[in-house]
Amino acid sequence: MSVKALKQWVRQTAAKTVWAYGPDKLVRQLKACGVVPGCTLIVHSSWLPFNGFQGKPADVVRALKEAVGPEGLLVMTSMPYHNMSSAQWLAKGKPMNVRRSPSMMGLISEVFRRSEHVCRSLSVTHPLLAWGRDAEAFIEGHENAEKPFGAASPFARLLERDALILGFDAPFASFTYTHFVEDQLASTLPCALYEPDNRPGVVIDRNDRQIDCSVKVISAQANSLRRESRLVEHLENTGVLHVGKIGNTRLTWIRAADHSRESARFVSTGGHFFDAPAATPNA
């Protein structure tokens, strides 16, 4: 047996034994993270091999629903593109079909999209999935938000609802709520957060009607100057960003309100998680 094959066997064995956990244990761990019946929870996820979970992605979805309960709200992102910016996605000219465009935000997200009583917002670039008591009200009007994660979007409602943001084998860098924070702090950035011109896009709604949208996209300069590790360090040092494990699954979580408050405080005290643009040399 090669060294690579041996390592594979060891991980497979560990996933079935020392790392093994099931839906019931996951629900208990979620409660320890602050997930209680009636709360709002937004989940970012990856389905990794050897994570130790004894079940399928659908079982993870069921456990998440059980944790928030029917009076709570479970939310996930469902962008129809991956490994590209929203500007690059829009440049392709493909519509976001609310019923047919798959979520490219991981297998758990796609399984959630297909599960019962899940609705999807009509954002052309950042559609959200929601399940729970007032899911339709939560996603309402996303297609009208010029800034897909701005003050008029459902991302702002995460703050209003004291939502918990959770990464299931997904790092802080995957938390789209950070873009909402950036939008709120846009005036403090050393560069423009958005490109100057809106970009057109098309959404196909549940009744196959076409909706023409016009949205802002984050500027290429902002993407290049973002230094999120500084913000992560601050959030960890202030005790609001938490990391734990269940089995071989890494959990990362933070309250939306804590994220907003501490990010603003970090900037107000002289720190920042964006670099200033390099000075242009004189001709």
Image (cartoon, rainbow, N blue to C red):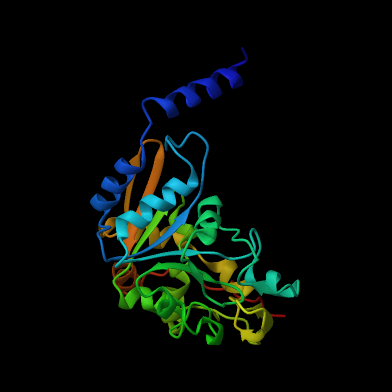
On the rendered image, what quadrant is the C terminus found in?
A: bottom right
Instruction: Work out whether residue 169 or residue 38 is closer to the camera in this orientation and state it.
Output: 38
Instruction: Work out whether residue 228 or residue 146 is closer to the camera in this orientation and state it.
Output: 146
Quarter of image, res 255: bottom left
- The residue sitting at the right extreme is 92
- The residue sitting at the top extreme is 1
Relative image position of residue 10 (x, y in whole percent): 49, 21
Q: Can residue 273 be seen at all in this image of the molecule?
A: no
- The residue under the point 48% across, 26% down is 11
Q: Can residue 253 be seen at all in this image of the molecule?
A: yes
Tell me if residue 243 comes above or below residue 43 in the rendering. above
Relative image position of residue 35 (x, y in whole percent): 28, 57
- The residue under the point 56% across, 72% down is 222
Relative image position of residue 144 (x, y in whole percent): 54, 87
- The residue under the point 57% across, 81% down is 194
- The residue under the point 31% across, 66% down is 72
Quarter of image, res 89: bottom right
On the rendered image, what quadrant is the N terminus found in?
A: top right
Tell me if residue 189 comes above or below residue 38 in the rendering. below
Quarter of image, res 220: bottom right
Tell me if residue 43 comes above or below residue 168 in the rendering. below
Number of marks drawn: 0
Relative image position of residue 192 (x, y in whole percent): 55, 81
Instruction: Work out whether residue 278 or residue 263 is closer to the camera in this orientation and state it.
Output: 263
